[in-house]
Amino acid sequence: MSRRRVERTYLMDEDGAMAQMQMDGHTNQQPREVALDDIAAAMAGCRLCTLGDTRTNIVFGSGNAHARVMLIGEAPGRNEDETGSPFVGAAGSKLDGFLERAGLSRDGVYIANVLKCRPPSNRDPKPQEITACAPYLREQIRSIWPDAIVCLGNFASQFVLRTGKGVTALRGRLHQAGHFVVAPTYHPSATIYHPDWADLIVEDLGLVRAWLDEHPQDDKSMRKEGLS
Ligand code: URA
């Protein structure tokens, strides 16, 4: 069987380690060592940036804590801020439809955002907000330790792949960032202005679906073999 080729990039810090936040009771947390609830508890009442002054709820993330696929969006919108759950508004309905078309189910994935608090009027995240929130997302990724990460939009793609490139240049193929296979794709909300991108999102999600099928959970040797 021919293996899907992936492009290598890095999710690591300059010193080769995925930067981490210090969790109580853990000196050097390993993959899947710290529970998501403990990370959420460490975030409670966060005031690391000014979004803490305007949010209603922290939107930590939701889904399968042992998912093979983690999706990362940009930031909560109004519905998410009100409910405390990611992708529950219009973008969420679109995302559900795209997942279904690609043969993935929302129940089987974990969904989080680059920012955990809503930027006023849904403006773009600011660099200092991304920096402040980054340790929480990194620890979520380390806790779930998925096989694949789907980056929805520019902010997630640039965060995970540590690049200034836009998603149009990155999408359409799988990347490798340390342990993770990464699929950058358009943000579901972007299809409001670019309806033709809906099929491209499904195509990108389909790459992940196919990669999962080609790399059954317990077959680590096959995963290595697939790397270019
Ligand atoms: N858009 C996002 O990026 N995240 C959400 O949770 C909702 C909309």
Image: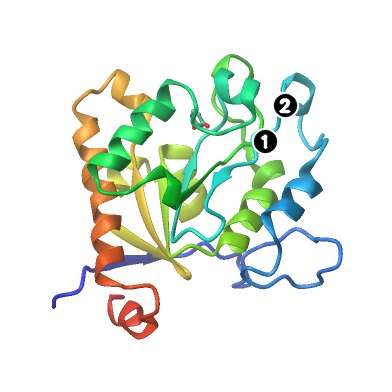
Q: Is the CB of mark 2 within 8 Å of ligand 1? A: no
- In this view, 83 is above or below 156: above
Please report the residue visible at 69 percent of the width from the left and 69 percent of the height from the top.
33
Taking 51 as reference, is 66 left or right? left
Answer yes or no: do the residues labelled 1 and 2 have beta carbons within 8 Å? Answer: yes
Q: Quadrant of residue 164?
A: top left
Badge 2 marks a residue whose secondary structure is: helix
Q: Residue furthest top?
A: 121
- Where is residue 134 drawn, in percent x and y? 65, 48
Instruction: Identify the residue position indicated by label 2 in the image.
Output: 51
Given residues 81 and 181, the one toward you in this image is: 81
Give the position of the N terminus as an image quadrant.
Answer: bottom left
- Where is residue 55 drawn, in percent x and y? 72, 23
Mark 1 or mark 2, earlier in chain: 2
Can residue 119 be seen at all in this image of the molecule?
no
Give how far apart the Cα atoms at labels 1 and 2 are: 8 Å
Q: Amino acid at mark 1?
A: Glu
- In this view, 195 is above or below 32: above
> How many marks can you see?
2
Give the position of the C terminus as an image quadrant.
Answer: bottom left
